[in-house]
Amino acid sequence: MTNSNKNKIVLVTGSRTGIGKETGVVFARNGYKVIFSGRKLGDCAVTVEKLLAEGLEASEIAIDLSDINNLEANVNRALEVWEGLDILINNGAIIDPIAALKQIRATELENSTIINFVAPTMLIKYCWEHLKNKKGKVLNVLSGAATNAIEGWTAYCSTKAALHMINQQTHVEGKKDFIKSIGISPGMVDTKMQGQIRQSGINQVSKVKKEDLISCEVPAKFTLWCASEEANEFSGRMISLGDPDVHKRYINWSERNTHK
């Protein structure tokens, strides 16, 4: 853990389970003040209580990404917890609807668009001035699906592609305000979403066995590196541990700086 992390504030959406939860835990154990958020208050309570018992700094604010009308008010409540923000992690997302393009329903597509694209975009807007004040960073959890069409994933691929563009847009417009924005492709991770994908049986991704998936700890620790100054040059890009250069630099940094 580096002293530079101390007192830095991070907000993680969709942190009730999976990558979001593990990311929040990793950040807290590496000196950050972490605001966990799920759809309902209490979704992240057990995780927060555990971290507090370890003497770490963690809090919880409910942010329902599907509730656009109350999104700004909920984000403002999060920003008041420690009076500011250094890092926004747009992690929350849904895979539904898993359906062929010819079968997709407008209401389902609209819900996916709101949660996976509109809400993360507005979160960046609502956090902008706070990130500007801290010369902060946005970390958008993306996917290989953002650049590759996958059978049955019309909603997920298209909304992640849209967020991929917002990541680039944040980088371009954030330059004058010293805000960085990095897209993270976490790989095939053992999450509840992957369970939904296996149950669908609709494409080759659904055939990947649970035992062949990577643990949530891997992308969580990678996200910690993306939050560091060493990763700043990747602002505006989507990166992954599958890139040999990125992987090498991450490993070298991790050995010097991380705490489990």
Image (cartoon, rainbow, N blue to C red):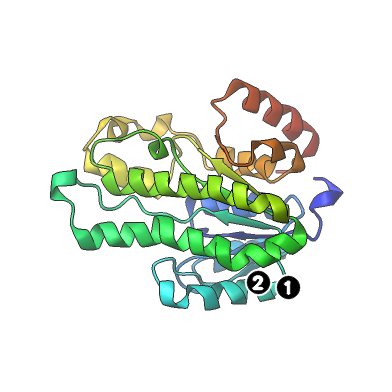
Residue 203 at x, y = what percent?
24, 33
Residue holding disc 1:
83
Q: CA distance from mark 2 to mark 1?
A: 6 Å
Residue holding disc 2:
79
The residue lying toward the viewer, choosing from 76 and 220, is 76
Q: Residues within 10 Å of mark 2 (few under 14, many from 20)?
A: many
* Residue beneath the point at 48% across and 44% down: 142
Q: Which residue is the extreme one toward the top?
A: 244
Residue 110, quarter of picture? bottom left
The residue lying toward the viewer, choosing from 61 and 245, is 245
Looking at the image, how many numbered discs can be counted on the residues?
2
Q: Is residue 208 above or below residue 154?
A: above
Residue 117 at x, y = what percent?
42, 56
Q: Are marks 2 and 1 in contact (CB under 8 Å)?
A: yes
**Quadrant showing the N terminus:** top right
Q: Is residue 178 above or below residue 111?
A: above
